């Protein structure tokens, strides 16, 4: 089978959460046989411990960052057991713009980020950047916390809302083949007893027509697709949740919806956000 994934990008800022993202990127690279790109951006404005500080000497910051990138490259290159390579890049400018340009220039197929365990400000900033990155690049973003390190993607949960998620289906099939996974198509039962049976049935039919990867369709109770997805995923000990960056997957609450705080930031299970084809 040909491999449609060749390049994984890991944005690094040399904090603890990078280790979780790098570990998952290495696992993916060893399973799918692709390259990893460690990318660090030196910005005119830096964010430290809840305060914005102007970099007094970007040249020195760049030299330090390049040395750290080389250390990471040397440390993790030996962890790859395939022909994949680890590339490092040091960029200068606004982080969002530089990341977007790099993704397009280097044909990045998936971005893997680590999530902060405790710092709420960092989580909020990250949630906004994920949504913006998805809108600008249309590249899947995998968010990983420390709790997401120990498992392969043996159980993949794919929530279905009001459309057939073709892009997520194709990516779930790819991962399912490599990791020998079972995929669970999840639909939410409404209060009045109705649910997305036609959409769920169509999704199941298309999935089964494309692959022999094991798949199950499940209808769950609840008022929120986010909460029901999290509860079901915990119940079956899922290893991955695949969502769209749309309102159905925002964490409940007015502020979370305003800030576009996705399911990724409430789930201890890794969450892969994939843009819908029509968005």
Image (spheres, rainbow, N blue to C red):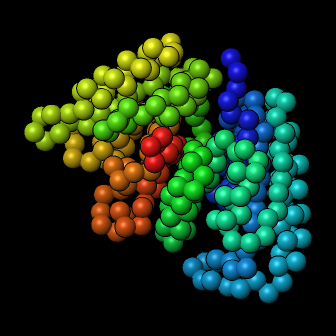
Residue under the point 46% across and 56% down: 265
Q: Measured from the top left, where is residue 140 in percent x and y?
A: 57, 44
Q: Which of the two residues, 68 or 52, is positioned nearer the viewer here?
A: 52
Q: Is 172 above or below relative to 112? A: above
Residue, x 58% and y 28% (percent of image)? 175
Say which quarter of the image contains residue 108: top right
Please report the residue visible at 37 percent of the width from the left and 64 percent of the height from the top. Answer: 256
* Count of numbered marks: 0
Answer whether residue 210 is visible to the viewer in this image.
Answer: yes
Viewer-proximal residue among 75 and 244: 244
Residue 218 appears anywhere in the view: no
- Residue 214, compared with residue 49, is above or below; it is above
Q: Is residue 167 above or below residue 116?
A: above
Across and down, in percent, residue 94 comes to 69, 71
In the displayed orientation, state which residue is furthest to the front: 278
95 displayed left or right of 132:
right
- Which residue occupies the extreme left position in the image? 192
Q: Position of residue 131 (x, y in %)?
A: 50, 58
Please tell me in which quadrant of the rendered image residue 1 appears. Answer: top right
Give the percent coordinates (x, y) of residue 84: 82, 34
State left or right for residue 129 relative to residue 159.
right
């Amino acid at each position: 089978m040909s491999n449609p994934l060749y390049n994984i990008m890991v944005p690094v800022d040399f904090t603890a959460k990078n280790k979780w993202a790098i570990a998952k990127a290495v696992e993916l690279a060893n399973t799918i046989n692709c390259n990893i790109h460690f990318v660090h951006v030196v910005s005119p404005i830096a964010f430290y411990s809840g305060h914005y500080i102007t970099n007094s000497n970007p040249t020195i910051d760049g030299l330090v960052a390049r040395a750290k990138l080389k250390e990471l490259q040397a440390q993790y290159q030996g962890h790859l057991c395939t022909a994949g390579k680890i590339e490092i890049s040091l960029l200068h400018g606004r982080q969002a713009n530089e990341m977007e340009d790099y993704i397009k220039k280097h044909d990045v197929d998936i971005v893997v980020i680590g999530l902060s365990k405790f710092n709420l400000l960092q989580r909020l900033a990250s949630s906004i950047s994920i949504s913006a990155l998805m809108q600008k690049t249309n590249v899947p973003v995998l968010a990983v916390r420390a709790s997401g390190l120990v498992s392969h993607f043996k159980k993949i949960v794919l929530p279905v809302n009001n459309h057939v998620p073709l892009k997520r289906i194709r990516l779930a099939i790819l991962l399912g083949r490599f990791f020998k996974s079972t995929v669970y198509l999840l639909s939410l039962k409404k209060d009045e007893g109705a649910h997305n049976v036609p959409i769920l049935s169509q999704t199941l039919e298309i999935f089964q027509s494309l692959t022999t990867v094991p798949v199950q369709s499940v209808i769950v109770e609840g008022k929120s697709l986010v909460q029901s997805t999290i509860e079901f995923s915990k119940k079956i000990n899922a290893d991955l949740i695949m969502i769209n960056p749309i309102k159905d997957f925002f964490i409940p609450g007015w502020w979370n919806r305003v800030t576009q705080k996705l399911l990724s930031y409430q789930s201890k299970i890794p969450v892969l956000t994939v843009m819908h084809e029509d968005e």
